[in-house]
């Protein structure tokens, strides 16, 4: 059973965060210093409801990546492509690294976040660019 508020659209918070990610990105931080990504109303680590926006570092380090050879139906990004999890200190963000293959990326590489529109779906797509 979901505790989501039926009067609040599902992507409330996410859209604003995606808008900011292409410029001055942020994450949510509780008073205990735990980081999380919007939309959140409660810290997933300690349950605090006292969350504030904190500046996302301009670059992060690749924590792990995978070269995808079979894309999900309707995704709109032609394989092969690289999906990466990038560590920005208190938070990690998952996205696509356009224009590289598995040999063109390594754990520890510095990347910066950005947002593109997926041409096939019209949805926002988190991407990473070389720092």
Image: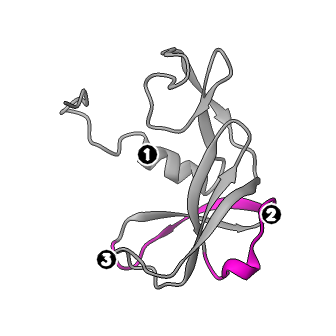
Q: Which mark is residue 14?
A: 1
Magenta highlight range = 98-121
Residue in view at x 64 percent, y 65 percent: 65
Quadrant of the rendered image containing residue 75: bottom left
Indicate the position of residue 9 as horizontal and vertical percent values: 26, 41
> Quick one: quadrant of the N terminus?
top left
- Classify 52 as above or below 99: above
Please rate how many residues cluster around mark 1, counting C-alpha atoms within 10 Å: few if below 14, some from 14 to 19, many from 20. some
Q: Is residue 75 left or right of residue 50?
A: left
Q: Is residue 111 magenta?
A: yes
Indicate the position of residue 2 as horizontal and vertical percent values: 22, 31
Residue in view at x 75 percent, y 45 percent: 57
Please rate how many residues cluster around mark 3, counting C-alpha atoms within 10 Å: few if below 14, some from 14 to 19, many from 20. few
Q: Secondary structure under badge 3?
A: loop
- Classify 79 as above or below 49: below
Quadrant of the rendered image containing residue 35: top right
Counting residues from the start of the chain, the first of labels 3 and 2 encountered is: 3
Indicate the position of residue 123 as horizontal and vertical percent values: 37, 65
Residue that carries the numbered disc 3 in the rendered image: 73
């Amino acid at each position: 059973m979901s505790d989501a508020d039926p009067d609040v659209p599902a992507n409330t918070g996410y859209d604003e965060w995606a808008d900011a990610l292409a410029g001055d990105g942020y994450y949510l931080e509780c008073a205990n210093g735990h980081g999380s990504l919007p939309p959140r109303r409660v810290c997933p680590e300690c349950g605090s409801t006292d969350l504030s926006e904190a500046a996302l570092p301009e670059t992060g380090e690749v924590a792990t990546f995978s070269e995808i050879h079979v894309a999900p139906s309707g995704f709109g990004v032609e394989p092969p492509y690289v999906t990466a999890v990038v560590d920005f200190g208190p938070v990690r963000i998952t996205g696509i690294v356009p224009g590289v293959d598995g040999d063109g990326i390594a754990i520890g590489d510095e990347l910066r976040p950005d947002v593109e529109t997926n041409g096939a779906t019209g949805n926002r797509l988190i991407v990473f660019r070389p720092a």
